[in-house]
Image: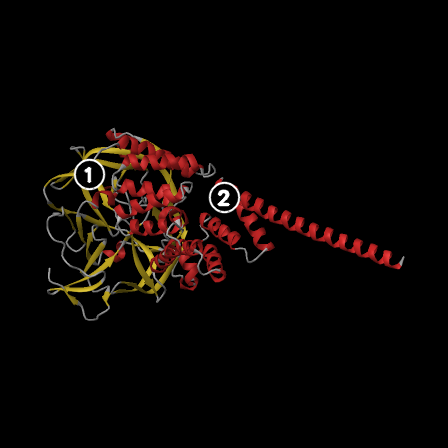
Amino acid sequence: MLGVNQIGAGGILALSLSIAIVSSSLAQAALAESRSNQFKRAEKELREGDYEEAAKIYRKLLKDDNRDNRARLGLALVLLKQLNYQGAYDLAGQAIAYDPLNARAHALLGTALLRSGDFKISVEEFRTALQIDEREALAVAGLAEVDFYENRVTESLEGLRRASFLDPYEPDYLVSLARSASRLERFSTAADAYQRFLEIAPKTDSDRRERIKGLIAFFRFLGNTKLHRVSGEKRAIIPFKMYNNRPFIKVKINGKDELTFVVDTGAGISVISQEVADKLGVKPVASGGRARAVGGSGTFPIVYSYLDSMSLGGIRLDAVPIYLRTIHHAESTPEEFRAQGYLGLSILWNFITAIDYKNQTMELEVRDSLLPVARVPLSGLVAVGETKKIYVPFRSTNNGLLSGEVSLDGSEVLNFIIDTGATTTAIAMSAVEKLGFHNKKSGPPTHVIGAAGIAENVDVILVKEMEISDLLHRNVRMPVLDFSALNETSGFKQSGILGGDFLRHFRVEFDFQRALMALTPQTEIVKIKYRDAEQVKQ
């Protein structure tokens, strides 16, 4: 009996262990299925634009398993969508620490760096990602965006086509593709890409969708039109008057009406006042959404129009797209300096453009594509005979603005918009916060008039040294402005504006083909940081 009892007990024990093992396996399977379902839910919320809910799910997954890189990288992508670049950077860096050969992690790290304005390291990360996996779409798109910002637009378009092929359900690639296509005046391609965006993008961002619907309508209106067709003289010297560090010129539109325009490299597209347009019978052709800008609410309604022609001295341009919007003025502004429009980069881009502040002339020259391009360095001080020029490379933002690199009181490099239409140099609130410049406040608050309206009670700081290439400007007062709206669409972070109070000390030349600004000093206010200048024969 003892033996029987012993056998019975052993059988019961074995059965219990079997049940325990099966139960454990079932529990693990259920847990795995639960995590799988949570990932599916997070990805669904991400696609539908509920970033808060997607982030909550990914954070729970990470809390349950802190080594789960899939959850970590999912959360990093959500934070990128929410414009939280530091958070995305931190998570991507942690993922690389766990798995150095994770292509997606390197691509996310590169994207966070690019959005923050760090081009050099972002490119390194994109290239690392593609060495690991040549089909990593985010890295392909990242390098294509860099091409766009640095004026290699054809290469940008091809890269974005490949990224969209690799990941056809990522709407951001389509927006970038449309932007590159429109820069190349391939408007049908741009409109088609935007239409596809509307089909797959979340329905939650209504303003962005309205902006894109407006662009589609405008691009369909333009069709195969060749814009800014240049005729007349090959070179024009146009006098201007200065007021509040801004150059004002006379512009003739549609062959008859002469208007007062500000030469404005801070405007991607030329602008006519809505009030003037109403008087002249210039009608809207499309509209939708709100543009991002500095001042007031940070936005203004987007209304597109189209001029048959615009004349600048002896140069005529046919087929000129423009914005119509309200133009704000200070009450004290004299009538002759109440701008009726802004001459933007979409016009200036067609020429080698020089703004001579000392002689108060703007020079426009049509580049002869058959002539060789003179050699110049990428940046820095150059001696051309007795004349010293400082070359400053610039990039183009998604908004079509020029962005150059600046350092303040020995800080890291910051990206500043180069803006001939701005009275003063300014700094972003986010830059003041990051650099700890709160203790640099100087004088009483001021007010600032921007494209989006008037900002009141604006703090002003005093920066001891501002460096641009080989130039040093001391004791610069800068109003502190909110750049958050503008940075939503700029593509990479802008930390300030390089305005007329700085530019007026130079003859400023823009070579858009080579993405270079040349500054020839005309006063002693801004100093050259002397070193051995490169001698260039032109």
Compared to 531, does 124 lie above or below?
above
Q: Is residue 429 visible?
A: no
Residue 27 image offset from top left, x and y in percent:
67, 49
The kind of secondary structure element at disc 1 is loop
Residue 78 image offset from top left, x and y in percent:
48, 48
Q: Hey, which residue is sitting farthest bottom in the picture?
A: 531
Compared to 334, does 304 lie above or below?
above
Q: Hey, which residue is sitting farthest right in the picture?
A: 1
Residue 227 image offset from top left, x and y in percent:
21, 37
The answer to the question of whether label 1 and label 2 lie on touching residues, with beta carbons closer than 8 A, is no
Residue matched to label 2? 46
Q: Nearer the viewer, residue 452 or 172?
A: 172
State how many labels appear.
Answer: 2
Q: Amino acid at mark 1?
A: His
Compared to 62, does 261 lie above or below?
above
Local crowd size for mark 2, using a 10 Å CA cut-off: few (<14), some (14–19), many (≥20) = many
Mark 1 vs mark 2: in front? 2
Compared to 209, does 490 lie above or below?
below
Residue 259 image offset from top left, x and y in percent:
21, 38
Which circle marks residue 228 in the picture?
A: 1
- Distance of label 1 from label 2 (alpha carbons): 41 Å
Query: Quadrant of the rendered structure where residue 116 is?
Result: bottom left
Closer to the chain start, of discs 1 and 2, is 2
Residue occupying image coordinates x 54% and y 55%: 68
Query: Quadrant of the rendered structure where residue 186 is?
Result: top left
Residue occupying image coordinates x 26% and y 32%: 222
Q: Is residue 271 left or right of residue 103?
A: left
Q: Nearer the viewer, residue 270 or 40?
A: 40
Question: Which corner quadrant holds the C terminus?
Answer: bottom left
Residue occupying image coordinates x 72% and y 52%: 18
Question: Which corner quadrant holds the N terminus?
Answer: bottom right
